[in-house]
Image (cartoon, rainbow, N blue to C red):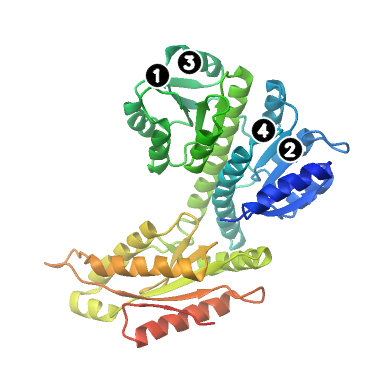
Amino acid sequence: MTARVLVVDDLPANVRVLEARLSAEYFDVITTMSGAEALAICARGECDIVLLDAMMPDMDGFEVCRQLKTNPATVHIPVVMVTALDHPSDRVRGLEAGADDFLTKPVSEIALIARVRSLARLKMMTDELRMRAVTSKEIGVQFPGRETADAGRHGRILVVDDRSSSYERITSVLASEHTVEVESNPNQALIRGAEGNFDLLIVSLTIENFDALRLCSQLRSLDRTRNVPILVITENKDNARMARGLEIGVNDYLMRPIDKNELLARARTQIRKKRYAERLRENVQQSIEMAITDALTGLYNRYYMESHLTALVQQTAARGKSLTLLMLDIDYFKAINDNYGHDAGDDVLRQLASRIRKSIRGIDLACRYGGEEFVIVMPETDMAVATIVAERLRRRIAAEPFTIQQGSRPIEITISIGIATLDGGDDTVAKILKRADQALYRAKRDGRNRVVADAA
């Protein structure tokens, strides 16, 4: 995973240090010493994350952050304020301006890289949701207008902590703005979190005789808690454990001793971000469900895929990133319809679509291209990785027979897959689809039940 990081600081030495640290971790780095120029870069969509100094002469970082977070075109860009200011009130000021985090100089390299990686993953998912929403609008599907502001209050929060002195203080602070529940038995927290429809989970990393990070990982892996933000409470200077938490999906952290205003500000920030993502998901789901999905399989249809792929190819080429497309076809599908009937064929198509969904990432796009043919679009993926995914999918399909309603025994199914990848800035949707189709044809010609990669 790569991301483009904008470093904003009026001191050249600070810029060079951050640029060197981030470049060493393979992030693309662009820099500016001006708040106004930073706003312009973000408005043009040229960065994924902003590292922003709080104290600058022309426009301070707090104002830059405030303008970014009040502009619908840039509200989704994560902002990390990096500054020598170390008082809790300064952190609160930055968080209230909309910052996603506030790092104090000298910045721990572990904390910096972990935070940037965590926010890059979040930004990738948000970008995909926003792009799908824009695609829906561009092809004529009704899409709700400008998002309303959300103060991040009146949320439902679960606190997982086994020390009464700790959770009572946390609860007393949060209760002024939210509904708060406490789970003091960490072994029950996973079930409680999944069943409670919470807006935020706060987990203490100092629970006695229990690995709280394992709980965070489990919460992140469950469907019902996958998108619920997790804020961990940790001891000061425990940078390595905090960084590990960010790697496994923790959204934010707070060091002890807890400042009550910072706790409130971080809770509001996480709840706002959750509600923003939920609105995007709901808007996309409501606007495209009937118009641009295939009624039989529930996957996107060809019209939506080609419209979405056009925008994705342009963006990918402009950023110099990779994109790979899989085109797959059910082998001998006509024989299934002839021997078992069209209802059986429909059963097979629905089950194949379900297996495809379970085999790809959230940022990948799967569609029914037509008949028994499907397309999977894989952003940020090169040919080597896509080939591994394709082979794994092919083996899974062949290994598990398909059940049909009108039949005494399951049907064995195989698929053939052709792969093509984006080939430079002059490539087009039509060209990449044609190369994938040609690779699929070779897979069919060479015996079926195989993966063939485009040689271009």
Q: Which mark is residue 162?
A: 1
Which residue shows up at 46% across the image and 67% down it? Answer: 386
In terms of secondary structure, where does tag 2 sit? helix
In terms of secondary structure, where does tag 3 sit? helix
**In the shown orientation, is residue 337 left or right of residue 116?**
left
From this viewpoint, is residue 332 visible? Answer: yes
Q: Is residue 427 above or below residue 86?
A: below
Q: Tag 4 or tag 1, which sits nearer the N-term?
A: 4
In the foreground, 410 or 95: 95
The residue tagged 4 is: 102
From this viewpoint, is residue 48 visible? Answer: no
Quadrant in which the N terminus appears: bottom right
Q: CA distance from mark 1 to mark 2?
A: 36 Å
Q: Quadrant of residue 52?
A: top right
Expressed as whole percent of the image width and height from the top left, the position of residue 147 reads 63, 42
In the foreground, 9 or 96: 9
**In the shown orientation, is residue 453 left or right of residue 4?**
left
